[in-house]
Amino acid sequence: MSQAQGNSTARRIAIIGGGLIGRAWALVFARAGCEVKLWDPDPTVRARVIDQLLETCQRSGDDPSAVARVTVCADMATTVDQVEWVQENGPENLGIKREIYAELDRTAALETILASSSSALVASSFAAGLAGRARILVAHPVNPPHVIPVVELCPGPDTAPDVMDRAEELMHAVAQVPVRLSREIDGFVLNRLQAVVLAEAMRLIEQGIVTPQGLDDTIRHGLGRRWVLLGPMATINLNAPGGVKDYLHRYGPTMARLSDSAARGEAFTEAAAEILAANLPVPELVQELSLQRDARLGELSRFLHNNK
């Protein structure tokens, strides 16, 4: 177990769950100078998390000295004591989430914000009925959050506006990119966009119009290259001489026709899965390829940061 270091004015953060996302969050906060306390219910996870964080730094190019600001705790109550923010990374299981938040609401100080990394469950589903539901929100990262900085901040119906303000300020302070949603919506923003793109991609592949490699190349070397710099709205603003209104006048009817005929949920078929499985690397290579992806994302993150 490492000992937390840093001055007395360092921001104090708690991480609940020491899996892939929890470790990445720990690194995000630690490299920003925060004092980080981490707890996982599995003692095996707790025993190896510091070594795993050091390995992550080696791959991502982060300064390993940041890991010295992470302390692994033996219980949840100690972890959340005197912290301003709790980042929860438990399973996407509503029953477990409710148990965790009932305990967090009971043990964390009243001013402590409780944020979930949930990618599927909205805050109201596990915060309902809790006395401190006004301080609970979803702070949904993109995997892996230490090299992909966007964080969707989604309030529940009872989340206080000042809690959202504090959440947004903290994310900026630790060099993440907060996207503040005005209300709850299933899938938040990123996964809703991803679902639509994947549905059409699945259908195009299953119909034999394009190969999986061709589809990936279309995104990687086409849309992805433009969007990584500007995003789709800023992109279309540059794609017509008169800006976005000109673009929509010129191309809106075509885009409407294509979107009206685009695939929906029916595109996620077993046939499409079989085609993809036959054309993509086998599951045994997924872990190694994920590590390679994270290293390359780290390089891209540093490049973009240095070329703003």
Image (cartoon, rainbow, N blue to C red):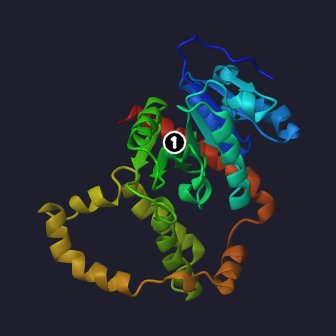
Expressed as whole percent of the image width and height from the top left, the position of residue 172 reads 42, 34
The residue sitting at 64% across, 82% down in the picture is 272
Could you tell whether 125 is left or right of 280 in the image?
A: left
Quarter placement of the C terminus: top left
* Residue type marked 1: Arg
Can you identify the residue that label 1 sits on?
Answer: 135
Residue 161: quarter of image = top left
**Neighbour tally class for label 1: few under 14, some 14-19, many 20 plus, Cα within 10 Å:** many
The percent coordinates of residue 180 (x first, y second) are: 40, 49
- For image coordinates 63% across by 22% down, the residue present is 66
50, 187: nearer the viewer: 187
- Image-based side of 65 in relation to 31, left or right: right
Q: In percent of the image, x 47 and y 46: which residue is there?
A: 150
Relative to residue 104, is residue 228 depicted above or below?
Answer: below
- Quadrant that contains the N terminus: top right
Q: Is residue 139 above or below residue 252?
A: above
Can residue 52 be spotted in the picture?
no
Q: Is residue 286 above or below residue 84?
A: below
Residue 166 picture location, percent across and down? 43, 35
- Seen from the viewer's position, the closer of residues 40 and 304 is 40
Mark 1 residue element: helix
Residue found at the very far right of the displayed protein: 44
**As drawn, which residue projects farthest toward the top?**
7
Query: Does residue 195 appear in the picture of this structure?
Result: yes
The residue depicted at 79 percent of the width and 32 percent of the height is 75
